[in-house]
Image: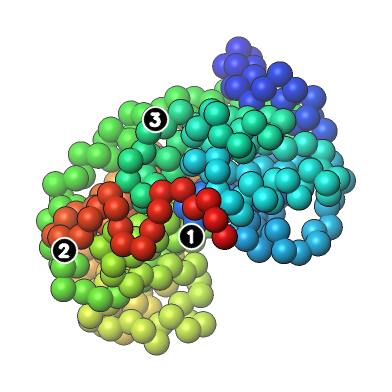
């Protein structure tokens, strides 16, 4: 299929041979890029049927990993100069991996120069310290990797075509999601006097919740945590009260009914719920429950990029209300080039 061949070629001339031989993917990254990698873990195993592990670069570089046969080592970084990620790549070259792939936004960076395969995210300069468009382009690049892997691991032409079509639809869905901006700006007013927030998601929405919590704490300085919603009863439920908003992301997936049960647990403890939900989710607004209706017909492969946008907007508007520096949060740097 023409689109599929072009997609695969975007990773480099050696990509076809390497992806055919890949039996395991090991993703290493830091911060926001790590969250993108966790999303990819779900997609690679569920869609491409290839085993995948994800690791924080600062942890990977200080252990002695066991490398499965024919493992592809994937690094993700906006700058391509992240010290821990770059050190991890250099160690991986000596560890017996099949090959290395960098997903990066800066073509002249060290990470790009030292990787065999490269996918440039082409997000353009991102001035703010807290990554936004860098993250959504990383998700898109990783989704392209999923399609390319699936092609060589059992996905037929029709399945490949469907996956490519879903990626082509992403810009239009993003435009629809951005129309929620005014509604989210109003919602942000309810966070101005809050000190804590809890983000919940299941499946690929768990790392999206992690990224939503990270954005809120980075630019508004509100303490925020994210949990897989099924973990509520294993500790976080003790924190839930009327003073801590609970933000949930609820696309229409196989895990939706499980998530609804978790949200009922929050309401039973008097928690205030804010749910970004598919219009066919069956989640309705009520006392203590605010529902922001997302675009309909968002597929599994599209949902991570689409559902992260309102969380980014929420963090942005809360930070503006609190008067913090959205572009230059205290104590942080755009490119972490030292340990």
Write the residue at 76% across / 50% down.
91
Lower position in the chain sequence, tag 3 or tag 1: 3
User: Disc 2 versus disc 1: distance between alpha carbons?
Assistant: 27 Å
Looking at the rendered structure, which numbered label has been put on residue 206?
A: 1
Write the residue at 23% across / 80% down.
243
**Badge 1 local density, few (<14 within 10 Å), some, or many (20+)?**
many
Location of residue 296 in the rendering, given as x and y in whole percent from the top left corner: 33, 41
Front residue of 151/126: it is 126
- Residue 33 located left or right of residue 62: left
Name the residue at the bottom extreme: 238
Mark 2 or mark 1: which is in front?
A: 2
Q: What element carries label 1?
A: helix
Lower position in the chain sequence, tag 2 or tag 1: 1
Identify residue for label 3: 124
Identify residue for label 2: 322
Q: What element carries label 2?
A: helix
In this rendering, does residue 49 appear at all?
Answer: no
């Amino acid at each position: 299929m023409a689109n599929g061949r072009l997609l695969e070629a975007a990773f480099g001339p050696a990509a076809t041979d390497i992806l055919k031989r890949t039996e395991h993917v090991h993703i290493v990254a830091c911060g926001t890029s790590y969250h993108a990698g966790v999303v990819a873990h779900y997609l690679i195993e569920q869609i491409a049927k290839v085993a995948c592990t994800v690791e924080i670069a600062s942890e990977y570089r200080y252990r002695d990993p066991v490398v499965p046969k024919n493992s592809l080592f994937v690094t993700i970084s906006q700058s391509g100069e992240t010290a821990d990620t770059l050190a991890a790549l250099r160690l991986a070259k000596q560890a017996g991996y099949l090959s290395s792939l960098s997903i990066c936004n800066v073509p002249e960076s060290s990470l790009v120069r030292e990787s065999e395969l490269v996918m440039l995210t082409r997000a353009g300069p991102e001035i703010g310290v807290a990554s936004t468009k860098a993250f959504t382009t990383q998700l898109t690049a990783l989704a392209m990797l999923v399609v390319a892997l699936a092609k060589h691991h059992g996905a037929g032409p029709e399945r490949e075509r469907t996956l490519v079509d879903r990626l082509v639809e992403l810009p239009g869905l993003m435009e629809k999601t951005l129309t929620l901006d005014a509604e989210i700006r109003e919602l942000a007013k309810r966070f101005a006097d809050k000190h804590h927030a809890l983000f919940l998601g299941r499946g690929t929405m768990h790392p999206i919740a992690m990224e939503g919590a990270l954005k809120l704490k980075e630019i508004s300085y509100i303490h925020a945590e994210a949990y897989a919603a099924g973990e509520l009863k294993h500790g976080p439920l003790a924190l839930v009260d009327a003073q801590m908003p609970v933000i949930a992301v609820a696309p229409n997936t196989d895990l939706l009914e499980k998530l609804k049960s978790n949200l009922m647990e929050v309401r039973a403890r008097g928690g205030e719920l804010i749910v970004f939900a598919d219009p066919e989710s069956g989640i309705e607004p009520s006392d203590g429950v605010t529902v922001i209706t997302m675009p309909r017909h968002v597929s599994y492969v599209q949902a991570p990029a689409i559902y992260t946008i309102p969380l980014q907007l929420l963090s942005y508007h809360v930070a503006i209300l609190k008067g913090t520096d959205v572009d230059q949060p205290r104590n942080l740097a755009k490119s972490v080039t030292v340990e």
